[in-house]
Amino acid sequence: MLIRPLLDILFPPLCHICKTFIPDAGDIHLCAGCREKLVPVDSPLCPVCGVSFATGSGIDHLCGACLSHSPSYTAARAAYAFGGPVQELVHRFKYGHKVHLCRPLALLTATHLAGFAAQAAADMVIPVPLHKKRLRWRGYNQAVLLGGVLAKEWRLPLVRRNLCRVRWTEPQVSLAAAERVQNVRGAFAVTDAASVAGRRVILVDDVFTTGSTVEECARTLKRAGAEAVFVVTAARAV
Ligand SMILES: [Zn+2]
Ligand SMILES: [Zn+2]
């Protein structure tokens, strides 16, 4: 194949983060140095909400929050701790209109959470929806783009228009944890309950912060009859 070497001369593959040349970039385009700075979310963690425990040793166990109140979703997992190169990728992807960065983020997530996705035995991937107004401003929904790659990698259908945002909400970023719960209460609706009834859903978002948005989405899906909701995010605030 002559095309690849020619393309590499015309468009040398560079690391998305530090812009160094990567001779064998593959699909993800992150150099070895930047990859080393990624912090995967690994055990020991809470098997429900997926929070990882700082101890770094021991077995998975329920966290205090899940013990006192179990979420509507069955389980949530994030691929990487939100910080370093992952934070930079997410910010440029979400706020900097660098739409192409959905691919490295989603491929890293697909690989790291392949076992979780397989165990979920899901019927479909549903992205966390944006309100129409915010979609107009941003031009794209980052969760739809991530979900599209994940659905393809995991060979599941991507269902985009069933779960909708029916109420405008303030950006969660500016709010405290308790306010976030109130802010998204009743913000979502399922338009076609029959197509989620009795089904297992993988719900996709970019970052899990307090979990109030995915909790409200999961609650809405469960009320529409979904059998189980599994949350997948590229990153998790630590
Ligand atoms: Zn790099
Ligand atoms: Zn938990």
Image: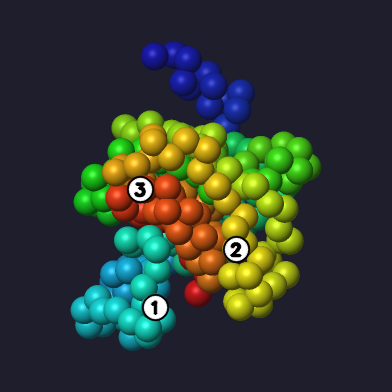
Left or right: where 127 falls relative to 227: right
The reply to whether callout 1 and callout 3 are in contact (CB within 8 Å) is no
Q: Which of marks 3 and 2 is nearer the N terminus?
A: 2
**How many neighbours does mark 2 have within 10 angstroms: few (below 14), some (14-19), or many (20 or more)?**
some
Q: Where is residue 24 in the image (x, y as percent from the top left)?
A: 42, 37
The location of residue 79, given as percent across then percent down, is 40, 58
Q: Which residue is drawn at 69% across and 72% down?
A: 175
> Residue 179, relative to residue 184: is it above or below?
below
Q: Is mark 3 on a helix, strand or loop?
A: loop
Q: Name the residue under label 1.
A: 69
Can you identify the residue that label 2 sits on? 185
Q: How crowded is mark 1: few (under 14 residues within 10 Å), some or many (20 or more)?
A: few
Provide residue 15's location: percent of width, then percent of height: 55, 45
Q: Helix, strand or loop at disc 1?
A: loop
Q: Does the rendering let one see residue 149?
A: no
Q: Which residue is depicted at the point 37% across and 83% down?
A: 68
Left or right placement of residue 24 versus residue 177 in this view: left
Q: Earlier in the sequence, mark 1 or mark 3?
A: 1
Cβ of mark 1 under 8 Å from ligand 2: the answer is no
Q: How far apart are marks 1 and 2 (CA)?
A: 17 Å
Q: Is residue 90 above or below residue 39?
A: above
Residue 177 seen: yes
Disc 1 to disc 3, C-alpha distance: 20 Å
Callout 3 amino acid:
Ala
The residue shown at (48%, 62%) is: 215
The residue wearing badge 3 is 226
Q: Earlier along the polypeptide chain: callout 1 or callout 2?
A: 1
